[in-house]
Every structure is written in structure tokens, then in C-alpha cells.
Amino acid sequence: MLYQRRISVWVKRIYITREFGDDDHGKAQRKKNRGRRGCLSGQKRIAAVARSFGVPVLMVSSFDHVLQAEEGVAVVQVDRGADSADLYIANHISAGDIVITQDYGLAALALGKRCRVLSNRGQEYEDSKMDFMLEGRHARAVERRRGHYSKGPKAITAEEKNLFQHKLTKLLTLLQENVQL
């Protein structure tokens, strides 16, 4: 219990953006998933891991999404807009927070504020790779403006969900072990 209290000094909060609220894409997929047992949404996976370490979670989304607060998970809803949730997170994070997002821009801002950043697929973003990732994002945006569209990301597999949960647990364990007494 001593470590669970002290880790909060280093990890004040885990911030997550809307894409982690549900693992599905749309109404038809939600109906399909209704009968499945043992299928945890991204939010529930994060909340379970964070709760075991005593770290609060803040989920940020626009008013367009209905989210439920639960034990250990606070919900903040912001105005509609392309980057409203990301800007809210960027303005409220501080060194030692963990940010979970798949947006490279938000990841770059969070790394600049000395936060740890994970993607929903379990990849930990690093400063050394961020320039390359942002350059690739810009190149894809230029291609979209020219009318060339890609297929988009593949659906997240069960293996990737488990990898993400493992990486988050490993990150929190590492931070807990590095707490200076």
C-alpha cells in the first residue's frame, strides 16, 4: 500500500482521449458485441490497471460522445471541435502524467511536457521518433489534399489489446519501482 500512495506523486493522472471509450465502431458493432462476455472496453481496461496502482484516470471527450464515469475514472466533456479534447489535455497535463492517445500531435505536446505517452496499440512514443512520425503525418495529409486516400488503420486485435494492457501495467510498475522514498 505504501507504494500505491507514493506512485500518485509521480503519476498524478492518466489522461485518455475518446477513442478509448469503446473498442467498437458504430451502432451495428455495439449490437454485435452486446452478448459477448469478458470483452472489456478500452476504458475499462485502463481503469482496472490504474485502480490496481491507485492512479486516477481522466477521460476527455466532446459533448458528441456519451461517457460514463466509474470508480477511478472521471469524465470531462469539452466543446465540439476537431481538437478540443486534445487541447484540453495539452493545457492540463504536467510532468509525470501518462497520456494515452493515438494522435501524434498530442503525443508530441505531452512528450514536450515530460509526460509518458502510450498509443492504444501499446506503443510508447519517444522523443527520438516523434519528428519522423510527425513528418509522416504531414506527408499523408498532403496526399489526402491531392485526393489520394488510404484505407485507414486496421481494427485492433485481441492481441493488441492485451499488449496495450501489458505495456500500461509495465509502465506503472516501472514508475512505481523508481519512486524515491
Image: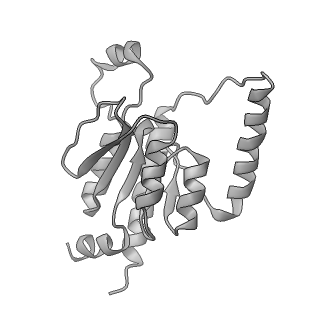
Q: Position of residue 152 (x, y in %)?
A: 64, 27
Q: Nearer the viewer, residue 177 or 29?
A: 29
**Residue 170, can we see it?**
no
**Residue 163, can we see it?**
yes
Residue 80 against residue 136 in the figure, above or below: above
Q: Where does the N terminus fall, quadrant-wise?
A: bottom left
Q: Nearer the viewer, residue 82 or 47?
A: 82
Q: Residue at x 42, y 34 (%)?
A: 80
Q: Position of residue 107 (x, y in %)?
A: 56, 54
Q: Residue at x 34, y 44 (%)?
A: 45
Q: Position of residue 78 (x, y in %)?
A: 36, 42
Q: Is residue 8 left or right of residue 79?
A: left
Q: Residue at x 25, y 62 (%)?
A: 54
Q: Position of residue 82 (x, y in %)?
A: 52, 36
Number of labelled discs? 0
Q: Residue at x 22, y 77 (%)?
A: 2
Give the image's coloring scheme: one colour
User: In the orientation shown, which residue stands out farthest toward the bottom?
Assistant: 181
Q: Where does the C terminus fall, quadrant-wise?
A: bottom left
Residue 47 against residue 175 in the figure, above or below: above
Residue 70's image quarter?
top left
